[in-house]
Amino acid sequence: MKRSISVIIIFCLVIQISNAQLWKLKRWEAEFGIGPSFSFPDIGGFSRSENLLGFRDLSFRQTRFDLNGNIRYRFTRTVNGRVSLTYGLLHSTDTRGSNEGRAYEASTSLFEPAIMLEYYFIKNRYESSYLFLKGKGFWNLLKSLDFYAFAGVGGVGYSVKGNDALINRGMETGGFSAVIPGGLGATLIYTPNINFGLELGSRYVFTDYLDGFTSQYSSANDVYYFLNFTFTYKLKSGPHGLPSFR
């Protein structure tokens, strides 16, 4: 009897230890994201007295899109590092805002490489369970959500095209600047190999010419945002810790 109880206890401990290590089998992840992009430059927008919390500056006319690719490495179960490459478009116009009389308009294309760290402050309960490998019901998928915060450093190369009014004023046509990304995200662990997610990221840029223009009344550099819908595929770790594509 005592031997049977000892075997059961040892078996349970082995299962728990093995479950806790499952994530190490797939430390590498490849991720693709796409979604709308928004910017808050000196062209367009309403003055602070006319725009509580900046919500009036959000409009379909100012919205463009971005494409994003990431390679992620899991240092621990809750801390990840990732290399990110993003191509995006931004748009700004005085057509709607407090400076319609200027009639400036600019379109910006950008390429942003960045390195980021992610911290998962809420982690799902299924990822490290053998039961997850056999699938689960729809409602239990809600218990497979992860929530994380991220921050990092990067750079952004940008090119600006303006209308005649902006060009005649003396537009900056582009450049390169340091950028600080940060934001929040949520991930749904759909299968052992596939995640779906949503991520909102802000970018603080060390330039005020992302739209090719700065105003004498400007008191801060430009900012832009990405809202990405993401698809993630987990890669098996090879014998030397590198991702395996087999």
Image: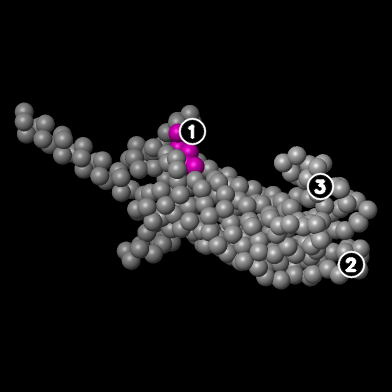
The Cα–Cα distance between marks 3 and 1, rounded to whole angstroms, is: 41 Å
User: What residue do we see at 62% from left, 62% from top?
Assistant: 179
Q: Classify mark 1: residues with Cα within 10 Å, few (<14), some (14-19) or many (20+).
A: few
Kindly state the secondary structure of the residue where label 3 is placed.
loop
* In magenta stretch: residue 101: no
User: Is residue 22 among the parts visible in the rendering?
Assistant: yes
Q: Is residue 179 above or below residue 118?
A: below
Q: Position of residue 30 (x, y in %)?
A: 50, 57
What is the three-letter code of the residue carrying label 3?
Ser
Query: Magenta region: which residues?
Result: 142-147
Display coloring = one colour
User: What residue do we see at 85% from left, 58% from top?
Assistant: 105
Q: Which mark is residue 53?
A: none
Residue in front for this viewpoint, 196 or 97: 97
Q: Is residue 175 above or below residue 105?
A: below
Q: Please report whichever mark, 1 or 2, sits nearer to the chain's N-terminal start.
A: 1
User: What residue do we see at 35% from left, 63% from top?
Assistant: 241
Query: For residue 122, which quarter of the picture?
Result: top left
Kindly state the secondary structure of the residue where label 2 is placed.
helix
Asked whether the beta carbons under mark 3 and mark 2 sit within 8 Å of each other, the answer is no
Q: Please report whichever mark, 3 or 1, sits nearer to the chain's N-terminal start.
A: 3
Q: Position of residue 41 (x, y in %)?
A: 76, 56
Q: Nearer the viewer, mark 1 or mark 2?
A: 2
**Residue that mark 2 sits on:** 169
